[in-house]
Structure formats: structure tokens, C-alpha cells
Image (cartoon, rainbow, N blue to C red):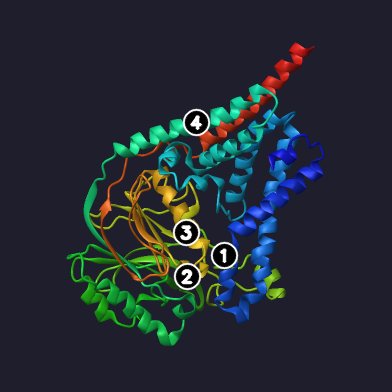
Amino acid sequence: MLWLLSGCKNLRISFLVGWFFGFGFFIFGLHWMAYPMLVDPAKNAWLIPFSIFIFPAFLSIFIGFVSIVSVFLSKNSVQLALVFPVIWVFFEWLRGNILTGFPWNLIGYSFSSFLTISQIASIIGVYGLSLLAVFLGSSFSLVGSKKKQNLILPLLGVLIILILHFLGSNKLDNSINQFQNIKLRLVQPNIAQNEKWIESLKYKNFMKHYSLSKYEGFNDVDLFIWPETALTFTSKNKIINKDAIDDLLGEDAMLITGMPRAIFFQNDSEKIKLYNSIVVLNNKLKILDTYNKFHLVPFGEYLPLRKIFDYFGFSKIVFGPIDYSRGIGPKTIKLNDLPSFSPLICFEAIFPGEVTHSKNRPKWLLSLSNDAWFGNFAGPRQHFEMARLRTIEEGLPLVRVSNTGISAVVDSYGRVLKSLPYGKFGVIDYFLPGNLQRTIYSRLGDILVFTLGILIISSVFLFQAIKKIFNN
């Protein structure tokens, strides 16, 4: 891409180069977005072109502007190699924050398979990793240049990677996992999405969760954890087999589960608010605490600009005619003497810097999801890797429970301690890993990355000015 942009002065052509690159990037990276439309094909199949072509085409506009701004600010290929990573990260950050935000498949996640290098995310976060990844790519665009000094940047990139690998290896080699004496049982029922909401199957689905929860393994489990919308009832009072919950939990254990919750207005019983929630229940079905999802999926859980889209025949993908309401978050939940946790539902775990309460830091992250929507494609794997990086950024372990997978326990360094793959049913028994001291990233967020970006751009302009003075 940079080879095409190098020497290009036409901003329109620059935009098209970036847009076509972005379109290829997003259309392959988000191919799984067609699958949710096939859960109910009679209703939603006609939306497939919008999900696999129109949406990637829209996201590609961000990459088009990356190209325009980078070319505008650069006078030669070296300056382009320096400016391009900064502008890329800026527009990547915009994509993750404007409107509802969609920070999916950020370039920084390309380091997810390199856990040693990823440890730097505790300081610079995923956007810092994006800056590093794009800098590596842009610097290597200079390889083959006739000017020997142009090789300094790719050599610098290799040196940075080697240093980060060494420091990360040293950090991991000297780390010792501490475990809380808290016994967890994670339940992955693997229920197909087109079977979840069928009335005649609700009892069967409920009992599958119960049966898995009763598997042999840990004795005296402290927390049973079920996935997002494991209970497909809008009220705890509609749970079919209350005796099963009492039998499962006994006097001391608790159940953390996802479920939709309907809240009726006191002055108008016909008006309700519907929430995608996490609830904590004891054996008597008393709700000990709740969390309502605050990062809702547009067109999935609610229909933006409803009057306009209703007119054109659009409807939200998720079951039911009522839009979900937005909750308040992030939130820290404290249960008795158990370590506090930050609850997250579905794609809330992909938002860097937004997974914990800023003034009430938890001891661990809990992510409940239902990735049956995504099918057995790249979506569930991408989702898991993005959630996993939050552990390094925050210095907190992650307990992730997904209907169809991937469910896992991940320590505060991003190491997967135990997991269940996509498409399998089963349970994970594990002790709760300990947390680390608060990381630099959890304190400062993306300030360091933006500061570094400003310094790089300023250095380019300063060098231009100095060179102009000496030439004169």
C-alpha cells in the first residue's frame, strides 16, 4: 500500500488506494458477519449484502482518510513511513470511539500470537501495539531503497521487536501465578442459536445448563457461571425448575448467569424496558446483584433511527420486537467476601480502557458471551483474542464463559490457563487467578500513544523546517 502511495500527490487517488486496501482488509476480516443473518434466513437473509459489502465499504472510508492525510503530510517515502503509522492509529481510534464505536480487528491484535511482545500492552495498550505493527510494515516499505540511510527505519523496527521480545520473555519467566481459594465452574452448553428462544425447548436448554453444572469435578464450588442469555426468561420468577437451582447452589454457592430482564414502569404496566443483563442468584432465587449491558450492538440489540429504518423494513437481529435499553457501566460487583469483579457482556470486552470502573478497580474480569451468532468461523476466535488482551492492559485475570465457546480462564499476563474450544459442550473447573498491581495503561489509557504520535509528527515537521533553513 505504501509503495503505491509513495510519490503520489493526487489526494483522490490516495483515498482510493486506501479505500480499496481497507475494503479487502474488512471484507475478509469480517466475513463471519453474514452468519447472524442465516440464523433466521427467512427474515434476515436479504441483509447479507449489507453486512459483507456495505459495512466493510463504510469502514474502508477510515483507511481512505488515513491515506489522504498521510500523503498530504509527507514529502518523501521516509516521512510517509513515519507519518502513516500515526495517522493509521488515530483513525483506528476514531473507528473505535465515534458513534457507537467498533474497535474490532485492530491491527495491534496481530501480536496476539506473540505473548512476549504483547506484554508491552500493559503500558501502551492495543493502540500502541497497532502503532508498532504499522510502523514495522511501513518501515519495511523502504527495503530496496537506493539510499542506505533509509534502511535505518526497518533496522530500528527489528531492534524494537527484539527488545520487546526479550523484556516480555523475562517478565513471563519471572512471573508466578497466585490463585485465590475461589472455586469456579464455567458452563459451556453449546446450544444452537436457532434453538435458544424456541418456547418448547426452553426447559431442555435450562436442564442442560443444570446437568453440566452437576458434573463431577470440584466439590464445594463457590461460583457457577453460565453464559450470556443462558436463561431465556425475562424474570427470575419464570425460571421453570426452581428446585434445580436450590439443589445446585445449596446454602453457600452462587450462580452468575446472563438473562434478558424486563422492567415495567410503575405508572404504566404496558411500558417496559428490556435489558441484556448479568444477574447473581442464591439458592432461593434472590437477586444479589445485577449488571445491565451498556455497549449495545446497533441493529442487533436495538435499531438506531428506528422510524427511518422501520420505514425501509429493517428490524433488529436479536429475538423480540422491543429494543434493549442501555445500562450504566462499567460496574464493579462485590459479593460477600469474594474478590470483586467487572462484568462484561458480549463485545463489551473489545473496548480498550472501558472494561473497569475508573474509581473502583475490580480484582478480575468476567465476560459472558453468546458467540453462536458468529458460527464456526473467525468471529469467535477474533472475539476471544481481543478479550484476552484486556488482561495484559489491565493486569487482571479474565474468566470468559460463552454459550458455544471459546470459554476460558486467562491469567493477568494473557496466558490461557484452561479453555474449551468452539462448538463443544462441557465445563471448566478452575481456581480464580490473582491480579497484578495496577498497570500504567489502566492509569493513563491511550495518553502515552497519543503523546508518542504527536512527537513523531512534530519531529517530521521540525526536520522539514531545519532542512529548509540549511538548504536556503
Q: Which residue does the numbered mark 1 point to in the structure image?
A: 32
Tag 3 secondary structure: helix
**What's under tag 1, amino acid-wise?**
Trp
Relative to 12, residue 253 above or below? below
Instruction: Of the two numbered discs 4 and 1 on the same chain, state the one appearing first in sequence.
Output: 1
Check disc 3: other Cα within 10 Å, few if <14, some if 14-19, many if 20+: some
The percent position of residue 188, horizontal first and vertical second, equals 36, 69
Q: Which residue does the numbered mark 3 point to in the structure image?
A: 381
Instruction: Of the two numbered discs 1 and 2 on the same chain, state the one appearing first in sequence.
Output: 1
Tag 2 secondary structure: helix
**Residue placed at 71% from the left, 44% from the top?**
65
The percent position of residue 191, horizontal first and vertical second, equals 41, 75
Q: Is residue 405 left or right of residue 469?
A: left
Q: Nearer the viewer, residue 444 or 327?
A: 444
Q: Which residue does the numbered mark 2 point to in the structure image?
A: 372
Separation of residues labelled 3 and 1 (CA atoms): 11 Å
**Residue placed at 59% from the left, 40% from the top?**
134
Q: Quadrant of residue 291?
A: bottom left
Q: Quadrant of residue 300?
A: bottom right
The percent position of residue 343, horizontal first and vertical second, equals 39, 57
Instruction: Of the two numbered discs 3 and 4 on the same chain, state the one appearing first in sequence.
Output: 4
Separation of residues labelled 2 and 4 (CA atoms): 39 Å
Relative to 30, residue 70 above or below? above
Q: Which label belongs to residue 160?
A: 4
Where's the N terminus, which quadrant? Answer: top right
**What's under tag 3, amino acid-wise?**
Arg
**C-beta proximity under 8 Å, tags 1 and 2:** no
Check disc 1: other Cα within 10 Å, few if <14, some if 14-19, many if 20+: some
